[in-house]
Image (cartoon, rainbow, N blue to C red):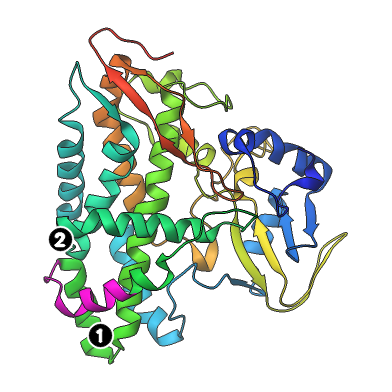
């Protein structure tokens, strides 16, 4: 697929879904500032451009991609407190994550066959968010399906793309949930802030909905992609995972995995006021897709330090739950890596078909003593 044909109105195709990185590398080389007329969208793949634009107030976050209430009062109360809480997880949160990981990994024993995506990649962040938000276990599977629908709606549309139905259903659930959910520490904090600052129910229920989607879908995708890489099921051979055969996972190796295996290939923005680049002018109302997946793989300019990861964004809209996601992934890998030599992939890894998302959807393995993944 040529660079000019990327992000058009046709389906992405199986080859792109399984490994989009060769096509993205060609795009960065041939058209680092690509305008897609059919979508009136700029696709930006140069790292310097992406970093500058992520910090540029003339770009607004795409509708539905963040907490709806962006008022100064809400950001200085709820958003600020959530950022502080998630940036420094309490012992209670760390213990909860460890307990969830143990529950999910414990059934993986020699002789069993399992799909690691629902069993681990989706189960760990799903159960952690259910604990934080007081979601009944019986509700979780349906909510996770709706969350995946919301994630798909983030992608570019194309002819024949599956329809999504979660735009109204998931927020409606959390409107009711906010009123009746048990008083978990996180919900108690939100309710105290609501009482102290007279915040509307709609803002708090939307916050819970967005926390659930962000805390389950993208973390699940990142875990799935990492597992596919470690088990030899990824077509991307960007780096050697041999150092991960020892435990525990170092922060540097985790950073590298997060950079190379982000499930969100691009961050979407909308132009507020005109932005002039060297050979392109971004006009008000136009959409922008910032290919952080390309920026994450840019070569280190001085060879002395790793490239800063943009997986969790940058600046004003840096992901609230980045530290929690890192905690979940590192805790799971520390527990799982000793078991990986016993796992063998039994079917080709299935990948989500999407333009701006890259995610392993099924990783079927058999577990046996002495088995070694290719």
Give the residue number, with chain letter if any, for mark 1: 194
Q: Is residue 286 left or right of residue 78?
A: right
Q: Is residue 191 a member of the stretch shown in magenta?
A: no
Which image quadrant for residue 321?
bottom left
Query: In front: 216, or 11?
Result: 11
Locate the C terminus and report the quarter of the image it occupies: top left
Q: Please, what secondary structure does the residue beneath circle 2 have?
A: loop
Q: Position of residue 349 (x, y in %)?
A: 46, 29
Q: Which residue is mark 2?
A: 136
| Residue at 26%, 44% in the rendered image | 123
Any mark on residue 124, and which? none
Indicate whether 125 appears above or below 143.
above
Towards the viewer: 374 or 327: 374
Q: Nearer the viewer, residue 262 or 39?
A: 39
| Dominant SS type (magenta) | helix
Camera-side mark, 1 or 2 = 2
Residue found 17% across the figure and 64% down from its top: 134
Q: Which residues are magenta?
A: 172-184
Relative to 242, residue 90 above or below: below
Residue at 65%, 32% (x, y): give it: 303
Q: Residue furthest front?
A: 160
Q: Residue furthest top?
A: 370
Secondary structure beneath disc 1? helix
- Looking at the image, the residue that sits furthest to the left is 182
Answer whether residue 173 is magenta in the image: yes
Above or below residue 281? Residue 175 is below
The answer to whether residue 321 of the structure is visible from this angle is no
Residue lying farthest to the right in this orientation:
279
Q: Residue 254 at what x, y percent from top left?
A: 42, 36
Near mark 1 (Cα within 10 A), the count class, few <14, some 14-19 or many ≥20, is some
Which numbered disc flags the more N-terminal residue, 1 or 2? Answer: 2
């Amino acid at each position: 697929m040529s660079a000019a044909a990327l992000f058009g109105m046709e389906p992405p195709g199986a080859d792109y879904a399984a490994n989009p990185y060769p096509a993205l590398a060609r795009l960065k080389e041939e058209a680092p500032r690509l305008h897609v007329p059919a979508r009136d969208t700029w696709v930006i793949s140069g790292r310097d451009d992406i970093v500058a634009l992520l910090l540029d107030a003339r770009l607004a976050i795409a509708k539905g991609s963040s907490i709806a209430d962006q008022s100064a009062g809400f950001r200085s109360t709820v958003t600020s407190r959530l950022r502080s809480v998630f940036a420094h997880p309490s012992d209670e949160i760390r213990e909860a994550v460890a307990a969830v990981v143990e529950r999910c990994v414990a059934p993986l024993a020699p002789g069993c066959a399992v799909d690691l995506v629902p069993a681990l990649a989706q189960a760990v962040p799903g159960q952690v968010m259910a604990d934080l938000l007081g979601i009944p276990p019986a509700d979780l599977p349906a909510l996770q399906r709706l969350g995946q629908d919301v994630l798909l709606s983030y992608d570019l549309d194309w002819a024949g793309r599956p329809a999504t139905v979660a735009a109204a259903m998931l927020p409606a659930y959390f409107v009711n949930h906010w009123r009746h959910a048990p008083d978990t520490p996180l919900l108690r904090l939100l309710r105290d802030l609501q009482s102290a600052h007279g915040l509307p129910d709609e803002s708090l229920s939307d916050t819970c909905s967005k926390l659930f989607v962000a805390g389950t879908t993208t973390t699940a995708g990142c875990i799935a992609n990492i597992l596919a890489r470690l088990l030899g099921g990824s077509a991307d051979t960007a780096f050697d995972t041999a150092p991960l055969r020892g435990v525990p996972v170092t922060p540097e190796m985790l950073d590298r995995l997060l950079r190379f295996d982000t499930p969100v290939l691009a961050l979407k923005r909308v132009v507020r006021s005109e932005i002039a680049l060297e050979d392109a002018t971004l006009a008000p109302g136009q959409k922008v897709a910032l290919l952080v997946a390309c920026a994450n793989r840019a070569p280190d300019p001085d060879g002395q330090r790793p490239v800063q990861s943009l997986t969790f964004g940058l600046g004003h809209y840096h992901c609230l739950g980045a530290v929690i996601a890192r905690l979940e992934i590192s805790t799971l890998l520390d527990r799982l890596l000793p078991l990986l030599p016993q796992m063998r992939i039994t079917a080709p890894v299935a990948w989500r078909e999407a333009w701006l998302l890259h995610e392993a959807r099924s990783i079927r393995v058999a577990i046996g003593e002495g088995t070694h993944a290719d």
